[in-house]
Amino acid sequence: MGFGRQVVIAGVYEHPTRWAPEKTQYRIHAESARGALADAGLGIGDVDGYFTSGVSQMGILSLADYLNLQPRFLDSTSIGGSSFVAHVTHAAAAIGAGLCEVALITYGSTAASERFAVGTGGGFGGDPPDQFEAAYGPTVVGAYALAAQRHMHAYGTTSEQLAQVAVTTRRHAGLNPAAKFRDPIAVDDVLASRIVSAPLHLLDCCIISDGGGAIVVTTAERARDLRRPPVYVLGGAEACCHTGAGHRDLTDMAASQSGPRAMSMAGVGHATVDMCMIYDSFTITVVMTLEALGFCGRGEGGAFVSEGRIGLGGALPINTDGGGLSSNHPGMRGIFLVIEAVKQLRGECGVRQVPDCRIALCHGTGGTLGLRHSGATLVLGRG
Amino acid sequence: MAETKASGKPVPRVDEESKGYWEACARHELYVQRCRDCGTVRYYPRALCPTCLAADPEWVLSSGRGTVYTYTVTYQNLAPGFRESVPYVLAYVELEEGVRLLTNIVDCAPDAVRIGMPVEVTFDDLTADTSIPKFRPVS
């Protein structure tokens, strides 16, 4: 099983900005597109498939207009921060089916400079469940905290264990000159930071930054004479998890469905994964995702992240760029998971390079863990 | 989208599928739906059974009793109406009828809430004709 053709990521670009009050969201999309196309050695005129999210309902049309694109395939799947991980799978499927050949995925946001309260504001829409939820004051942080509290109750997971994720990620950010927060932190710093929504402290939460990025996906054939070594899209899958008409187990997440599907499609087992990029909206998201993906048993995630495994030099380094907890989080982080994984597979990460990185797994969680969320898993390999 | 009452807190926007539920809440009665075909109890109320897609559910009066399935004490919410209400307890309560619903735990110190704690329904009258179910520890 595969995409019908060998599909590769030929170019990536992470916009270096973390604070861009002088730029519009669209300009960040365009600068990111320019960066990823230059990385691939392609021009804007080569693009015939376009993917984006995080814009208004029909924002993909406005962005295609802004970039003067004439795509023959468009997709603005909007399933939260994981959308851009799903876009890679969708692009691979479209390319495999011959619906397009050079797919461009872009993201841009000025969440920080526009002072969006990403995690602690309102922002609920008009969908049917809203009338049964909004009056109780569920913030994004609160909706993840509900899952964290249940996980702690069911498995004895501790705040100290969750803090290990933030501490490890910050250490990685110290190795990334572009990361927003680079000074080391200790477990005690996380525990001493104010509680936003119990049991989650401020340092259990991702940061808010500006930023953007772009990815170019094409066929292995087309990539043969391009600038960069291709990174193969080996497997991709998605899933969603919601309130289940009142019967949901809050310690489960969509990753437990999408992870095995993507790994099976790629034909890789856990032992062959060299590094993971896990959406770290909150520390609990990482612990539960590692369990759901099967890197450890259900309930073992707290111990798993506390024994040095997830840091550089450990058995399964994660979020080597510093993650959303320390590097950047402009509201939707999925695209950065893919960009960092590609750089690791190409061996371009310098002091934070995972040695001999051959297989990388990205998992994006979008929406809110305690209400409705999506999971998108992507398995990438170097040639 | 919810409308906004004077306090700034959102008031549920009732639709044709939820009308019966909210009318009962206004009388301080909590109902859940049960499928007449497959028997599955569901929350929130909706027109078709998400298990078998049958229409015309039975409305079942809830005992109003349950236990705290999980909770969080929210210390920061910048949204109007909630900014002034922190800290408050957001929770899922598992009703005796077997379904879990999002709610607030009230009438107790936020720090006193625990998973598994027995609770009972109490209604918060948001407006003259809209009340929402919240829960308090069983006395």
Image (tube, coloured by chain):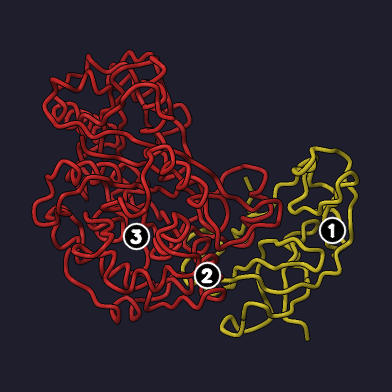
Q: Nearer the viewer, residue B65 or A133?
A: B65
Q: Name the residue at 41% across, 77% down.
A: A159
Query: Whole-percent x and y of residue B98?
Result: 77, 63
Q: Quadrant of the C terminus of chain A?
A: top left
Q: In which quarter of the view is residue A71 placed?
A: top left
Q: CA distance from mark 2 to mark 1?
A: 29 Å
- Residue B119 position (above or below residue B33): below
Q: Secondary structure at mark 2?
A: helix
Per the image, the residue denoted by label 1 is B31
State the mark number for residue A206.
Answer: 3
Per the image, the residue denoted by label 2 is A151
State the mark number for residue B84.
Answer: none
Which one is in front in this view, the residue at disc 3 or the one at disc 2? 2
Chain rendered red? A
Looking at the picture, which amino acid does disc 2 mark? His
Drawn side of residue B66 relative to residue A43, left or right: right
- Residue A45 position (above or below residue A369): above
- Both marks 1 and 3 on one chain: no
Chain rendered yellow? B
Count residues near mark 3 (Cα–Cα under 10 Å), then give few for <14, some for 14-19, many for 20+.
many
Chain under disc 2:
A
Q: Name the residue at 31% across, 36% down.
A: A107
Q: Nearer the viewer, residue A198 or A58?
A: A198
Q: Secondary structure at mark 1?
A: strand
- Both marks 3 and 2 on one chain: yes
